[in-house]
Amino acid sequence: TDCPIGWFASLSGSSECTPCAVGRFRDSSSNTCIDCPVGTFASSTGSAHCTDCQAGWFAALPGSSECAPCAAGKFRDNSTFGCSNCPPGTHTPKEGSAECIDCQVGWFAASPGSRECAPCAGGTRSVDSTECARCAAGTF
């Protein structure tokens, strides 16, 4: 029996069709259900395709039924499957970020994966937003 896409015949020669489970799909090129690839998900049974996770969210394992948000200090744009640490000089305070935010003038984030920037101490200034350096004599 030919089952509709998103469904499959659980027994060979059976006329009964069963929907693919969540996290799996069946398109017209296959006779069986297949796990959604990493970075995609299928949240309902009987799926004909998987959906890409939105930016800031990820599906780390094949066969995912949902995406999870990247942790604070991490981001995911649509060019990668997993979350990446914000580079030094940037931060993101919330989960599910698609990009990192530059530290404002006078603040810094020395480590990758920062959730927040810290202010430079009095008598210092930020250098590339990654560290603070003493101000030159006669300046502050």
Image (cartoon, rainbow, N blue to C red):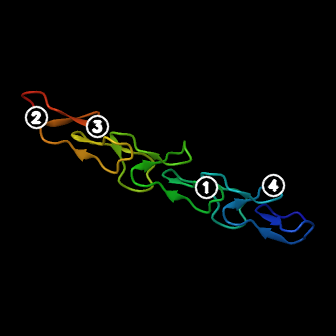
Task: Residue type at mark 2: give it.
Answer: Phe
Q: CA distance from mark 3 to mark 1?
A: 35 Å
Q: CA distance from mark 2 to mark 4?
A: 68 Å
Q: Which is nearer the N-term, disc 3 or disc 2?
A: 3
| Quadrant in the rendering for residue 14 | bottom right
Mark 1, Cα crowd under 10 Å, few <14 / some 14-19 / many 20+, is some
Indicate whether 37 appears above or below 12. above
Of labels 1 and 2, the one closer to you? 1
Q: Which is nearer the N-term, disc 3 or disc 4?
A: 4
Q: Is residue 13 left or right of residue 18?
A: right
Q: Which is nearer the N-term, disc 2 or disc 4?
A: 4
Please identify the residue farthest to the front as the structure is shown.
111
Residue identified by numbered label 4: 28
Whole-percent x and y of residue 139?
A: 9, 30
Q: Residue at x 83, y 68 (%)?
A: 10
Disc sitting over residue 61 in the figure: 1
Task: Residue type at mark 3: give it.
Answer: Ser
Residue identified by numbered label 3: 129
Residue identified by numbered label 2: 140
Of labels 1 and 4, the one closer to you? 1
Residues under numbered marks 3 and 4 in contact, where contact means CB atoms less than 8 Å apart: no
Task: Residue type at mark 1: give it.
Answer: Leu
